[in-house]
Image: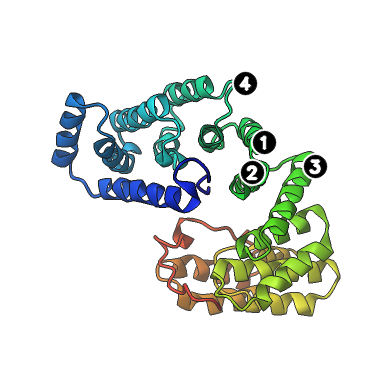
Amino acid sequence: MAIITGGRFGARGLWKVAQDYLSLYLAGTKLNKQAAKELEQKLSLDPSDELSRLKLMGYYPRRAIWHREDREKAVGHELWFVRNHPSHPQLRFTHCSVIAGDDQDLYELLNSAWLEHVKDDCKDVTILSHAAAFFTMRNKELAIQLIERAREIEPLNNNLLRDLAHIYSLGLIRKRDELWLRRAYEVHKELTEAEPEAIRQIAALARIALMIGDVEAAKASAQRILTTHSVVHPSLLQDAHSVLGRIFLKQGDIKAAKGELLASGSWPEFDLDNELIAIGETRVVCDHLWQSLSAWKAGKIQLLLWILQLRIGAKPKLIRNWLLSCGIGGYENLRPF
């Protein structure tokens, strides 16, 4: 989620501050146990040593998945910032909160601390936004309320609008009611009107417009991505071809839909593949998976398994899994297709 503008730094200055702190966090991921112990000792003498605390917030999450003690320490450091410096730029990145998300008691500590800051009399846009970043994990409705409150204070702040669109998009990962879908569409449409050159936002609008049934808006958005002269990430090109292919399927033009699939590249999103499998068009899906093999290392295993299943008459549901994650699976083609 984007850094909020405003305050004494301004947009450019605050972004640099946030990036500097993020660099400290990333440096913490490379600490060894002894170095982390030494930083903890420094903090015991000077709890206000933010630089040491930020490095430790980078150190503990990589161990926390296995160790409750490390989750406690990670959350403890984030909790210190929430209680003492809730507008700190690092709180835009809720890494420690996320890794402790399944520990209800640890979550409640952070939950209670943020609720203390965002009572009705809170008019600090940065605090409202940071709190929303935390609540997005488990309480998206509250996160939306906080961003809407912030927008009442700064109605022209596009960063807040991006935050709002992000929350609505995350909510669509799970099935949401018609009201949620309609609001997500309206927010994304407003955002693309405010930032007409933001390709990622155009791609998001294309997907949501298709979900809500606005075929013309979905088609126009997808075509705009494919005709842009800027460098476009493979995932966005895949989104555009997928949206157009699904529109062609709705219109009964299977040949055009298959053409969009073969043009979509090897990014691991399979909505169009699955719709073609559902109507028996498995051969073109095999062709698509086959031409995607060269972009993967370990991911080849999953693609070949699906090809085999399809060729023997099965209809597997293609989903992005750990073998098709860009890190583990070894996705190599980061250029536009």
Q: Position of residue 64 (x, y in %)?
A: 33, 37
Decide if residue 283 is in sight here.
no
- Check disc 2 and give the amino acid type: Leu
Marks 2/1: CA–CA distance: 8 Å
Q: Residues within 10 Å of mark 2 (few under 14, many from 20)?
A: many
Marks 1/4: CA–CA distance: 13 Å
Of helix, strand and loop, which one carries label 4?
loop
Q: Earlier in the sequence, mark 4 or mark 2?
A: 4
- The residue pinned by badge 2 equals 164
Q: Earlier in the sequence, mark 2 or mark 1?
A: 1
Q: Position of residue 188 (x, y in %)?
A: 70, 52
Disc 2 vs disc 3: which is toward the camera?
Answer: 2
Q: Earlier in the sequence, mark 2 or mark 3?
A: 2
On-image quarter of the C terminus: bottom right
Q: Residues within 10 Å of mark 4 (few under 14, many from 20)?
A: few
Q: Is residue 227 left or right of residue 182?
A: left
- The residue pinned by badge 4 equals 120
Q: Quadrant of residue 331?
A: bottom left
- The residue pinned by badge 3 equals 178
